[in-house]
Image: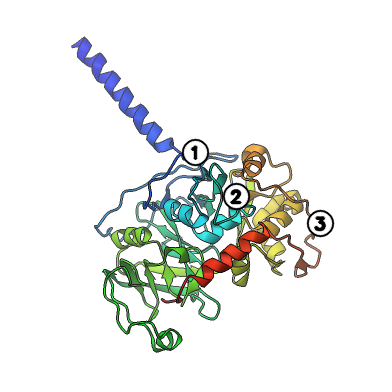
Amino acid sequence: MTRFLIALFAVTALAHAAHAKDNNDSRMAGTQPVAGVSKPIVDNDPDAKKGAPKPKIKTTKKSSKVAQASAPAIAPKQNYVGKIETYRARGDDTLQSIGERESLGYVELRAANPSMDPWRPGAGRFIILPKMHLLPDGPRKGIVVNLPEMRLYYYQSNGEVATFPIGVGREGFSTPTGSTNIVSKTKGPTWRPTPRMLREDPSLKPFYGPGPDNPLGTYALYLGWPEYRLHGTNKPWGIGRRVSSGCIRMYNESAEYLFGHVPVGTPVTTVRQPIKFAWIGDMLYIEAHADGMLADQMERGEIDYRVPDDLFADLSRAAGKSRDDIDWKAVREALRDRRGYPVPILLGAREDQKFVTDSMMRRAGTERVEDREVVPPSGNASAPVPVPAPGNAGSSAGSAGARRSMGGFNS
């Protein structure tokens, strides 16, 4: 009996050790992802400690069963999801192919790695994967879409938050903001181009059944807004770009996840929040994204930026009693760079409070540029801010070439 109990204890200890390793495993630079797999970022308790806690990642398996509708149980202090990861590029990698494997959009990868040639990063190149996100303001229930971020958040009934990159409406065909819900969903959807689409692109057929030529991809979730959908795609390069006619595009794997987990009737809220603030422990963070035409400029590696008129007031409110401790230089750098991941903005921020450290930026070839001017809260917040163009001139031509090869901007 004694030997049996000792053996049982040993087996149990090994099982717990293996489980702990699985739950804390993160991608190391140099590891290779499995091609064709696009997993959601899922988090359930990322704000457990003060300081700069490391987010806890939990990946769920795909399911063909629809989850039962119930109120999400989100911890009140949960205000971010995911973690920053890094990756060593292979010889045939592009930012687009990396985005497909890692469930990231093109512009967010471009923003986090502005010095990199997006079409030829180079074997062994150190790449920052911006998989950490502050949760947008708004209801923490159902689906929330932040259009400038080109990212969807799904607050699940078990208290977890899953997030996915998306493609949104191009200039003149903006995805609407507001509230609606999922009214139906389909596996293997059919698609009929609108009369406008047929006029703009005579090569389109009047009807597309399920299959590789269908712009809706393999799954579609229909919204209460007529003619708007969450759907997969047959053009994955459009994820993380403003290229649709107003629908919300997703990688097919992401659309499959939502199809299997989101019940009909789930509320959907779309917001426009290019700049987000949140406390993580005792540090205040900002996450800045390019919005509208600025996102198109970011895609090309060139951008001019205006500071929103109400930015400083919003930031002061978020800082509360710590408003006198705001590092305005760090704020200005974050607004200029728009890297798309959380950056600490209180004076005296430690290196361990930076989710992307100076060392990581150097390894990615992204040096910090000295700020030319810091506008205090009493300054002219709406004045243009000179912005050095990230990346190199060669990458702009590559991006333009990619856009020319995109074909029609359908769905």
Q: Return the residue found at the far top.
A: 2
| Dot placed on the residue nearer the N-terminal end, 1 or 2 | 1
Amino acid type for the residue under numbered disc 3: Arg
Badges 1 and 3: C-beta atoms under 8 Å apart?
no
Which quadrant is home to the N terminus? top left
Residue 252 position within the rendered picture, expressed as x and y whole percent measured from the top left: 35, 62
Disc 2 on helix, strand or loop? Answer: strand
Which-is-in-front pick, marks 2 and 3? 3
- Structural distance between the alpha carbons of marks 2 and 3: 27 Å
Q: Nearer the viewer, residue 150 or 223?
A: 150
Residue 224 position within the rendered picture, expressed as x and y whole percent measured from the top left: 37, 77
Q: Which mark is residue 30?
A: 1
The residue indicated by pointer 2 is 279
**Corner quadrant of residue 299:** bottom right
The residue sitting at 56% across, 50% down in the picture is 121
Q: Which mark is residue 372?
A: 3
The residue sitting at 28% across, 76% down in the picture is 190
Left or right side of 59 for 169: right
**Residue 319, can we see it?**
yes
Amino acid type for the residue under numbered disc 1: Gly
Left or right side of 386 for 25: left
Amino acid type for the residue under numbered disc 2: Trp
Q: Which mark is residue 77?
A: none
Which-is-in-front pick, marks 1 and 3? 1
Residue 399 position within the rendered picture, expressed as x and y whole percent measured from the top left: 57, 64
Left or right side of 60 for 312: right
- Structural distance between the alpha carbons of marks 1 and 3: 36 Å
Residue 31 position within the rendered picture, expressed as x and y whole percent measured from the top left: 45, 39
Label 3, residues with CA under 10 Å away: few <14, some 14-19, many ≥20: few
- Structural distance between the alpha carbons of marks 1 and 2: 32 Å
| Dot placed on the residue nearer the N-terminal end, 2 or 3 | 2
Which-is-in-front pick, marks 1 and 2? 1
